[in-house]
C-alpha cells in the first residue's frame, strides 16, 4: 500500500488521543506503512465464506446471577486518583462542549 | 549427538532436580522453613539482580512475612498446599493488591491495585509466596524486554544480550535461580520466546483454561497467563494450580482443566509427531539443527515422526500484527490520567488525556496503539481486522486437519538465539519476526510449550516447541517430558545463584 | 409552532425517538455492584465498573431477561446477539469505550401501536452499559462555562436498554404519545421504572423536515436534555420551526447534536466541528455471544403480563362494544397508566357498578398512585359498594377513600369513625323540605325555572346534613318537589 502521510498519522493520533510531535508523526507514518504493508499480504487472501473467529473456543451465554457483591472501599479507590474533590474524581473542563 | 549423561535411560518425572517441588516437599515435611527459603532467594536477588534487572519490585518484608505464616501453619499440622513455601515471581502486569503493578510503564508507575488477580489468589491458596514483580516490555508489547520504561533485563547466559520478551524478567529470574517459579503472559509468544532464549521451560495454556481476571489486558482474545519453570513437571504442577474455571472471567472455560501431572510418565510410544516445515525453514541453522535433533530423540523414544507442511501458518504473523494491536489500542484507552496513574495537567480534559498518554507511553506502545487504531478505523475494518479474524479461522481449520494425522506438532520456538541488546530496536518488523513460530498457537487458542534443548555454538540456549490441539495439555506435557529427558546438557548461565 | 401548523406550511416533520431506559436490576450489567440511585459518590464501584487494569465484565442474567421482556413487549424478534466496543474518550467513561451492541442487537423489528391507532416501528432495542455522572463546577453549573468537572462512577455500568424507533413520527403530539405509551410498557414489563425526571428514562429526539409529499429524508439533528414529556413536545416544536426557517431562507440544516435549554425554550448546538465520529466498533473480546433459546424466550414472554393497550381494552370491554366517550377513555387511560386497573376489574367482577369504580379509581386513587397501588383490593370494592348502595354519599365516599389511602383500614370502620352514614330516603326528604322552607324566595325562582338554584339548595342540604346527603339524590328530590 502507498505510504501514510503526516496528516493520516495526525488523524490517527487524534483518535487515539496521544500528543505526537511532527517528527514522531513522520516516523510513525513510515513505520505504520511498513507494518501495514506486511500485514496487507492477508488482504489478498480469498476468505469468501470464511467466518471470522472472535473467540477461539465456542462459549455462549456466560452470565452471573443478579446478586449484590461487595464494592471497593472508596478511600482505597480515591487514594490512587490524581485529583479528588468531594469524593469524586476531578478533571479539567471539556473543550468539546464549548459553544 | 549423544544425550546428557545419565538422562538417556530415564525420563521419569522427578528424576531431575526440580527446585520448586523440592522446596514444597521439604517445607511441608517441616525439614526446612519457608522463611529460610525466602531469605535464600532474597539474597540471590540482592546479589545478582543489580546486573540482571529481572525485578521491578522485590517484596523483602512481605515475602518473609508470608513465609512466617506458612511456617506457623506447618507447625500447627496444617498442609499449606502443593506449593508450600515456594517463592514465585510474577510478571508486573498481574494485579497484586497493595503492591505496585506498573506493566513496566511510566503511566502506571506507582499504581497499586485494590485487588489481586485470580492467579495470585490461587498461588497463595496453594501455599506459594510472592517474592517480587518482574520486568517486562511495556504493557507486554515486545520480544526483548527492551521496551520497559525502567530499563532492559539482561540474559543470564550472556548479559550483553536480551532475555527475550515480553516476559523477560520472569524468564531471567528462573534461569538465574532468583526464583524457582515465575508466571508470565503470552499473547504472541511472550512466555515461550523468552523461555527459549533463557533456557527454561515456558508454556502457554489453551485459551480459556487460566483466568485473565487481574491480568492487565494487551490483546484480550490472545492473552494467557502461563508458567516459567526449570522442569516440565513443575510446569504441569503450576498449570494445575492456576488453571480452572473463574466466575470473574467470561472467557474462562466451564469445563475442568485436564489433569496433566498424571500423564507425564506415559512416554511417547506410538504417538504421532509432525515436524512443521513452516516452523523450521526460516530459522537460524543452529536452531534448526536442534529441532532435528529433538525429532530424532522422539523417534528413538518410540514416536512416529514425520515432516509436514501447514502453509496457512505463514499468515499468522501478519494477522497477529493486526489483531493484537487493534485490541490493544482499545484496551489501553483507559490510561487517560483521570482515575489512576500518571497525569500531566492541562487546561482541558482532552489536552490532559493527550499529554498524559504522550508522556506515559513508550514508543513501541504508541506505535501499536497507532497501528491498532488505524486498523479499526472507518474504511479499514473489513480489510484489516475483519480479514485477520478470518485468517484465524483458516489457521484453526488447517491445524485441525493436521491434528487428524498427528497428536502433537514440533518446531522451533523462535528463529534465533538471544540477540544483542539494541540489535533490533530500530526496525520494528525485524523484531516482530521473533514471533513467527509462536503466534499461530495464540491465534488458534491452542497450548504450546518450549523445552530447553541444548545450545548454539556460542552456548546460547535453544528451545524446541511442542504444539497441541485445544485442551491437549496432557499429551503436550507427555512429549515435553520425553524431550526434557533426552535434551543435550545446557551449561548453567554465566549469572546464576 | 403548533403541531398542525407545520403541515400547513407544506413541510413534513420526520422524527424518530431514541429512548435509553435504566433497568431495575439489583446489580450492574457486568459486575455485582449495587444498581442504586442517590448513594454517596463512588461507593458502588469495583475494578470492573471502574475499568481498572486487569478487570473483566461478566453479564447479568437478569439484565438479559429484562431486555427480552422489553423486546417482546414491543413485538420484536429476539435474536442471538453479541456485544461491541464503542470507542471514544470522555471522563465519565471508565474504559474510554462503552460496551454496547452494534450490528447484532438482541431485539429487532418490532412496533408500538399508539392509542390513536398509529403505529411506530421499532428498529432495535439493545443492551448497553451506562456511563458515570459528571458535574460541571464553576460557571454557574452550565456545561459550556465550567471550570472543571467532578465524576461519580456509581452509575457507570448500570444496565440500559436503548430503544430506537424508525423515523415514523410526524408531529410533537405523536412523539409525546409514543414516549408516554412506551413508558407505560416499560413499567408494565417491570424492567424499568420509566421516570424521565429522574433519568431512568432518557428520551432523545431525531428531528428533520422535508417538503410534504417527498420521500427523501432531510438532514436531522439530535435533540438531548429532554426531562419531561412537556419538554419533549416543546423542543420538537421549536426544532421543527428552526429547521423550516433555515430551509426557507435557503440555508442548510447542519447535522449536529443540539441541547434543549428549558429556560430559554431553544435548542443549542453543543458539539464543535467533528460530528461524524469514528467509534471503531469491533466485537467485545471479553464477552461471549448471548443466544436465548426458544424455551427461555417463551418463559419470559409468559411472565410479562398484559401491556397497557390490552389492559385499557379489558376495561373498555366492561362497557361492551359501544364506543367509549372521550371522558371515559381518559379515565381508563389514567387508571391503566397508574397501574390501578386491577381495582376496577375486581370491582366489576364483584358485581359493583363499573362506572362508579372507574370514577373512584381515576379520581381519588389516581391522585395518589403509589398509595393506591398498595390498597387492599377487597377494601376498595367494599367502599364502592357502600357508595353504590347508598350507605355513603359521594362526598363521604371520597373522604373515606382518601383516608384509606393515607392510613389503610376498613372502609366501614373509617365511615363509622367519621360519623358518616348517608341519609335514608325519608330523612333526605325531611331535610330537603326543611331547607326549601327556609328559603321561600329562592324556591319560587327555582320553581319558575331558574335551574341553577338547584345547586344553592343542594349546598344547604349538604351543610345541614353534614354531607350525609347524596348530591344526586338531593337533585332528584328537588325536581320531584318542583314537579
Image: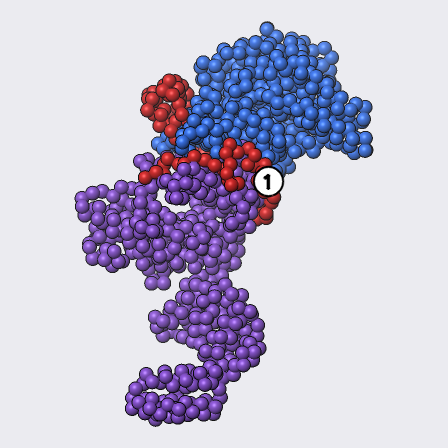
Chain colours: A red, B blue, C purple
Q: Chain of mark 1?
A: A
Which x, y percent locates residue C275?
32, 38
Task: Name the residue: 47% across, 62% down.
Answer: C306
Q: Is residue B357 left or right of residue C205?
A: right
Task: Name the residue: 67% across, 26% down.
Answer: B130
Residue closest to the eye, C481 or C4: C481
Residue closest to the eye, A8 or B249: A8
Q: Is residue B377 left or right of residue B120?
A: left
Task: Name the residue: 56% across, 43% down.
Answer: C43
Residue on which the image places disc 1: A73
Task: Name the residue: 36% across, 71% down.
Answer: C327
Q: How many marks?
A: 1
Residue closest to the eye, B283 or C449: C449
Q: Dividing the image into 4 quarters, which one contains the N terminus of chain B?
A: top right
Q: Dividing the image into 4 quarters, which one contains the C terminus of chain B?
A: top right
Work out whether residue C15 can be spotted.
no
Which x, y percent locates residue C219?
27, 44
Q: Is residue B40 left or right of residue C436?
A: right
Amino acid at each position: 500500500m502507498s505510504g501514510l502521510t503526516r496528516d493520516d498519522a495526525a488523524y490517527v493520533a487524534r483518535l487515539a488521543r496521544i500528543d505526537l510531535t511532527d517528527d514522531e508523526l513522520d516516523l510513525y507514518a513510515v513505520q505504520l506503512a511498513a507494518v501495514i504493508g506486511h500485514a496487507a499480504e492477508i488482504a489478498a487472501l480469498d476468505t469468501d465464506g470464511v467466518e471470522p473467529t472472535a473467540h477461539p473456543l465456542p462459549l455462549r451465554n456466560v452470565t452471573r446471577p443478579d446478586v449484590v457483591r461487595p464494592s471497593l472501599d472508596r478511600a482505597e479507590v480515591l487514594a490512587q486518583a490524581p485529583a479528588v474533590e468531594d469524593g469524586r474524581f476531578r478533571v479539567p473542563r471539556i473543550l468539546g462542549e464549548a459553544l | 549427538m549423544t544425550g546428557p549423561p545419565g538422562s538417556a535411560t530415564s525420563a521419569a518425572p522427578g528424576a531431575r532436580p526440580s527446585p520448586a517441588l523440592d522446596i514444597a516437599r521439604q517445607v511441608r515435611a517441616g525439614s526446612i522453613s519457608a522463611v529460610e527459603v525466602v531469605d535464600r532467594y532474597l539474597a540471590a536477588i540482592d546479589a545478582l539482580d543489580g546486573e540482571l534487572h529481572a525485578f521491578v519490585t522485590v517484596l523483602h518484608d512481605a515475602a518473609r512475612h508470608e513465609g512466617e505464616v506458612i511456617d506457623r501453619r506447618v507447625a500447627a499440622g496444617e498442609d499449606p498446599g502443593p506449593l508450600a513455601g515456594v517463592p514465585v515471581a510474577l510478571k508486573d502486569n498481574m494485579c497484586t493488591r497493595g503492591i505496585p503493578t506498573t506493566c513496566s510503564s511510566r503511566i502506571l508507575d506507582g499504581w497499586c491495585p485494590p485487588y489481586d488477580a485470580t492467579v495470585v489468589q490461587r498461588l497463595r491458596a496453594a501455599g506459594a509466596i510472592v517474592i517480587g514483580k518482574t520486568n517486562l516490555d511495556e504493557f507486554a508489547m515486545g520480544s526483548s524486554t527492551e521496551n520497559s520504561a525502567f530499563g532492559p533485563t539482561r540474559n543470564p547466559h550472556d548479559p550483553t544480550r536480551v532475555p527475550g520478551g515480553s516476559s523477560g524478567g520472569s524468564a531471567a529470574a528462573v534461569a538465574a535461580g532468583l526464583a524457582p517459579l515465575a508466571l508470565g503472559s503470552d499473547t504472541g509468544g511472550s512466555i515461550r520466546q523468552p523461555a527459549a532464549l533463557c533456557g527454561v521451560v515456558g508454556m502457554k495454556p489453551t485459551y480459556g483454561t487460566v483466568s485473565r481476571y487481574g491480568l492487565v489486558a494487551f490483546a484480550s482474545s490472545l492473552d494467557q497467563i502461563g508458567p516459567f519453570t526449570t522442569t516440565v513437571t513443575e510446569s504441569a504442577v503450576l498449570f494445575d494450580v492456576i488453571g480452572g474455571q473463574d466466575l470473574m472471567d467470561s472467557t474462562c472455560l466451564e469445563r475442568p482443566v485436564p489433569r496433566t501431572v498424571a500423564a507425564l510418565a506415559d512416554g511417547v510410544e506410538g504417538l504421532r509427531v509432525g515436524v512443521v516445515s513452516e516452523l523450521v525453514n526460516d530459522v537460524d541453522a543452529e536452531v534448526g539443527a536442534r529441532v532435528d535433533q529433538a525429532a530424532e530423540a522422539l523417534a528413538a523414544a518410540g514416536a512416529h515422526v514425520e515432516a509436514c507442511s501447514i502453509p496457512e501458518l505463514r499468515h499468522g504473523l501478519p494477522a497477529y500484527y493486526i489483531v493484537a494491536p487493534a485490541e490493544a489500542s482499545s484496551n489501553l484507552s483507559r490510561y487517560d490520567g483521570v482515575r489512576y496513574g500518571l497525569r500531566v495537567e492541562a487546561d482541558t480534559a482532552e489536552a490532559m488525556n493527550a499529554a498524559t498518554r504522550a508522556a506515559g507511553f513508550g514508543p513501541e506502545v504508541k506505535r501499536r496503539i497507532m497501528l491498532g487504531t488505524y486498523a479499526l478505523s472507518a474504511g479499514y475494518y473489513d480489510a484489516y481486522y475483519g480479514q485477520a479474524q478470518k485468517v484465524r479461522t483458516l489457521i484453526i481449520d488447517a491445524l485441525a486437519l493436521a491434528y487428524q494425522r498427528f497428536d502433537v506438532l514440533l518446531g522451533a520456538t523462535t528463529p534465533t538465539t538471544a540477540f544483542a541488546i539494541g540489535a533490533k530496536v530500530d526496525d520494528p518488523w525485524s523484531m516482530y519476526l521473533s514471533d513467527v513460530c509462536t503466534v499461530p498457537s495464540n491465534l488458534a487458542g491452542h497450548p504450546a510449550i518450549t523445552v530447553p534443548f541444548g545450545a548454539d555454538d556460542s552456548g546460547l540456549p535453544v528451545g524446541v516447541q511442542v504444539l497441541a490441539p485445544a485442551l491437549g495439555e496432557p499429551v503436550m506435557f507427555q512429549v515435553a517430558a520425553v524431550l526434557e529427558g533426552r535434551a543435550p546438557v545446557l551449561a548453567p548461565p554465566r549469572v546464576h545463584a | 409552532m403548533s403541531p398542525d401548523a407545520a403541515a400547513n406550511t407544506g413541510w413534513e416533520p420526520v422524527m424518530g425517538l431514541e429512548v435509553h431506559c435504566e433497568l431495575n436490576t439489583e446489580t450492574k450489567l457486568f459486575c455485582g455492584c449495587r444498581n442504586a440511585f442517590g448513594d454517596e459518590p463512588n461507593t458502588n464501584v469495583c475494578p470492573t465498573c471502574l475499568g481498572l487494569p486487569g478487570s473483566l465484565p461478566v453479564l447479568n442474567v437478569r439484565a438479559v431477561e429484562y431486555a427480552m421482556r422489553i423486546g417482546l413487549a414491543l413485538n420484536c424478534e429476539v435474536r442471538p446477539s453479541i456485544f461491541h466496543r464503542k470507542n471514544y474518550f470522555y471522563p465519565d467513561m471508565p474504559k474510554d469505550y462503552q460496551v454496547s451492541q452494534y450490528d447484532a442487537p438482541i431485539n429487532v423489528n418490532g412496533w408500538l401501536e399508539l392509542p390513536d391507532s398509529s403505529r411506530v416501528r421499532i428498529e432495535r432495542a439493545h443492551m448497553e452499559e451506562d456511563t458515570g455522572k459528571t458535574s460541571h463546577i464553576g460557571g454557574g453549573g452550565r456545561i459550556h462555562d465550567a471550570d472543571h468537572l467532578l465524576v461519580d462512577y456509581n452509575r457507570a455500568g448500570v444496565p440500559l436498554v436503548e430503544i430506537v424507533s424508525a423515523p415514523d413520527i410526524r408531529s410533537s403530539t405523536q412523539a409525546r404519545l409514543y414516549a408516554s405509551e412506551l413508558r407505560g410498557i416499560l413499567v408494565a414489563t417491570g424492567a424499568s421504572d420509566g421516570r424521565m425526571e429522574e433519568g431512568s428514562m432518557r428520551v432523545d429526539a431525531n428531528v428533520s423536515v422535508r417538503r410534504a409529499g417527498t420521500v427523501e429524508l432531510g438532514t436531522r439533528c439530535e435533540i438531548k436534555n429532554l426531562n419531561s414529556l412537556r419538554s419533549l413536545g416543546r423542543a420538537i416544536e421549536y426544532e421543527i420551526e428552526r429547521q423550516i426557517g433555515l430551509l426557507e431562507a435557503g440555508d442548510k440544516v447542519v447535522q449536529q447534536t443540539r441541547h434543549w435549554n428549558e429556560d430559554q425554550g431553544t435548542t443549542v448546538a453543543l458539539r464543535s466541528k467533528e460530528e461524524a465520529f469514528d467509534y471503531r466498533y469491533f466485537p467485545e473480546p471479553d464477552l461471549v455471544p448471548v443466544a436465548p433459546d426458544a424455551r427461555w424466550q417463551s418463559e419470559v414472554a409468559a411472565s410479562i403480563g398484559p401491556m397497557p393497550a390490552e389492559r385499557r381494552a379489558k376495561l373498555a370491554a366492561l362497557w361492551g362494544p359501544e364506543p367509549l366517550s372521550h371522558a371515559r377513555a381518559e379515565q381508563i387511560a389514567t387508571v391503566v397508566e397508574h397501574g390501578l386497573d386491577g381495582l376496577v376489574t375486581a370491582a366489576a367482577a364483584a358485581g359493583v357498578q363499573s362506572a362508579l369504580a372507574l370514577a373512584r379509581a381515576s379520581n381519588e386513587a389516581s391522585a395518589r398512585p403509589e398509595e393506591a397501588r398498595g390498597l387492599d383490593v377487597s377494601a376498595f370494592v367494599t367502599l364502592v359498594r357502600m357508595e353504590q348502595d347508598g350507605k355513603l354519599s359521594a362526598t363521604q365516599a371520597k373522604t373515606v377513600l382518601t383516608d384509606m389511602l393515607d392510613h389503610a383500614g376498613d372502609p366501614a370502620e373509617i365511615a363509622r369513625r367519621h360519623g358518616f352514614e348517608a341519609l335514608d330516603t325519608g330523612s333526605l326528604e325531611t331535610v330537603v323540605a326543611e331547607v326549601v322552607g327556609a328559603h321561600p324566595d329562592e324556591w319560587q325562582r327555582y320553581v319558575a325555572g331558574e335551574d341553577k338554584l338547584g345547586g344553592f339548595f343542594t349546598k344547604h342540604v349538604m351543610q345541614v346534613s353534614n354531607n350525609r346527603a347524596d348530591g344526586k339524590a338531593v337533585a332528584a328530590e328537588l325536581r320531584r318537589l318542583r314537579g
